[in-house]
Image (cartoon, rainbow, N blue to C red):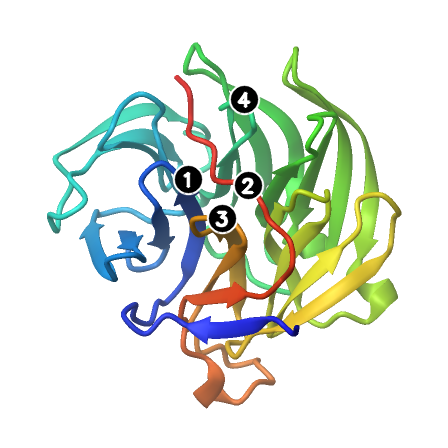
Amino acid sequence: MAPVVEKIAELGKYTVGEGPHWDHETQTLYFVDTVEKTFHKYVPSQKKYTFCKVDKLVSFIIPLAGSPGRFVVSLEREIAILTWDGVSAAPTSIEAIVNVEPHIKNNRLNDGKADPLGNLWTGTMAIDAGLPVGPVTGSLYHLGADKKVKMHESNIAIANGLAWSNDLKKMYYIDSGKRRVDEYDYDASTLSISNQRPLFTFEKHEVPGYPDGQTIDEEGNLWVAVFQGQRIIKISTQQPEVLLDTVKIPDPQVTSVAFGGPNLDELYVTSAGLQLDDSSFDKSLVNGHVYRVTGLGVKGFAGVKVKL
């Protein structure tokens, strides 16, 4: 059976929809609109949708383990704890944890995700970064239990998709400017990465656009959102440079993906509605909707909460 791509009608259009996170415990999807500075909550079983707004650019929202109603979020260069009742138009409070790059005023945090152990990993990019490649001023960090950040990589154009192998021995990472997915050896005991090498290169497979967010399924394959590519691609982690499948999405600017649903067999997809002057796509297709893909024949993993 071919995958079914459904626009979620009760959700709106987003300038830069990003960072989908599925909270399996509450059967809730969280995501952000980076440019509109908003955090969003969607409960599919009730078709209930709410959001709150802050005054800084945002890129991820991840529930804090053991603290209902509290979330680890990005606010430009800051990692913070947001307290939100999930209903009100404004958060109850915001508690700054750390400014990862106080010395680089033109940078902001981008994609962020907790590894399977609950450690937050996130990277930065220039606020005015563009594609194919803008300023290469980003870095990759993790946030420790001591609430301090450690830098792992620098010279990144646009810090994006993060995923980990099921055995926690590999980390998969995307710098969108490189147009490829990279693989690292991952040491969970020291929270260190090493031996970077390309896993999948867009140019070799003539895949248009840029890799953005990604997630991994139970079989160990990656699902990668393709910005300006109007698709999601499924790639192998067992063999480098193997394209397994392509799922076309009606929106050209596909930004990120996350497995969800009661059985974790639905793929939630965010997109952007940016009207870019250099876009080759029909502008009427650029809407920034959120989609649900079913019939993929595989399950994934719920979003992991941050442990602090």
Residue 221 coordinates in the image, percent (x, y): 73, 48
The residue under label 2 is which amino acid type?
A: Phe
In front of the other: 146 or 291 = 291
Q: Which mark is residue 263?
A: 3
State the separation of the CA atoms marked 2 and 1: 35 Å
* Left-right relation of 182 to 38: right
Three-letter code, disc 4: Leu
**Residue placed most toward the observer, 25 or 33:** 25
Tell me the SS state at disc 1: loop
Which numbered disc covers residue 117?
4
Are dots 1 and 4 in contact, CB under 8 Å?
Answer: no
For residue 289, which quarter of the picture? bottom left
Q: Which residue is mark 2?
A: 301
In terms of secondary structure, where does tag 3 sit?
A: loop
- Locate the C terminus and report the quarter of the image it occupies: top left
Residue that label 1 marks: 105
Position of 307 compared to 234: left or right? Answer: left
Q: Residue at x 24, y 29 (%)?
A: 68
Kindly state the secondary structure of the residue where label 4 is placed: loop
- Mark before the other along the chain sequence, 1 or 3: 1
Looking at the image, residue 271 lies above or below residue 195: below
Instruction: Determine the CA span between mark 4 and mark 2.
Output: 13 Å
Disc 3 versus disc 2: nearer the observer: 3
In this view of the protein, which residue sits in the foreground, 256 or 295?
295
